[in-house]
Amino acid sequence: QVQLVESGGGLVQAGGSLRLSCTASGSILNMYTMGWYRQAPGKQRELVATISSISGRGNTNYADSVKGRFTISRDNAKNTVYLQMNSLKSEDTAVYYCNAHYFRYDYWGQGTQVTVSS
């Protein structure tokens, strides 16, 4: 069983920055595709960004709405994935979830709230 623990959420003004962290319970980054998703009130959960495993060359993928503003990265030694969020907008307000995916296996963190005030 993989456990994911997120941190780094909070309240920030529009135009500001936050960095989210997701630490996995084991050395899974070499196999799992890691991702960040978010869910705003009354909306479905949506993809924010993903980064493939080491064997997948660490390719990144971003939602159009965050391209150029958010960056996903990982520290394999720390079993941690980061989401650097710059130029935040009010529409980025949501609960952000970390995800680990490998074939039929999917694990989720508990979520961390990000609130952007305008």
Image: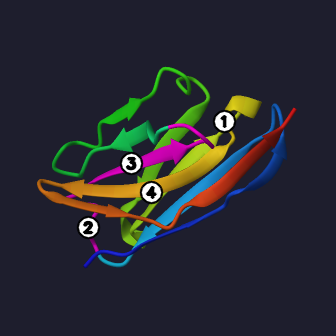
The answer to whether residue 25 is left or right of residue 117 is: left
Q: CA distance from mark 2 to mark 3?
A: 13 Å
Secondary structure beneath disc 2? loop
Residue lying at 55% horizontally and 23% vertically, measured from the top left = 65
Q: Amino acid at mark 2?
A: Ile
Q: Which segment did they paint magenta?
A: 27-43
Q: Amino acid at mark 1?
A: Asp
| Tags 1 and 3 touching, CB below 8 Å | no
Mark 3 or mark 4: name the one nearer the start of the chain: 3
Whether the magenta-drawn stretch holds residue 108 is answered as: no
Q: In this figure, which residue is indicated by the disc labeled 3?
A: 35
What's the distance in space between the residues labelled 1 and 3, CA to CA?
16 Å
Q: Is residue 49 left or right of residue 1?
A: right
Q: Which residue does the image show at 49% across and 63% down from the upper left?
A: 22
Mark with earlier residue (1, 3): 3
Q: Which residue is mark 1?
A: 92
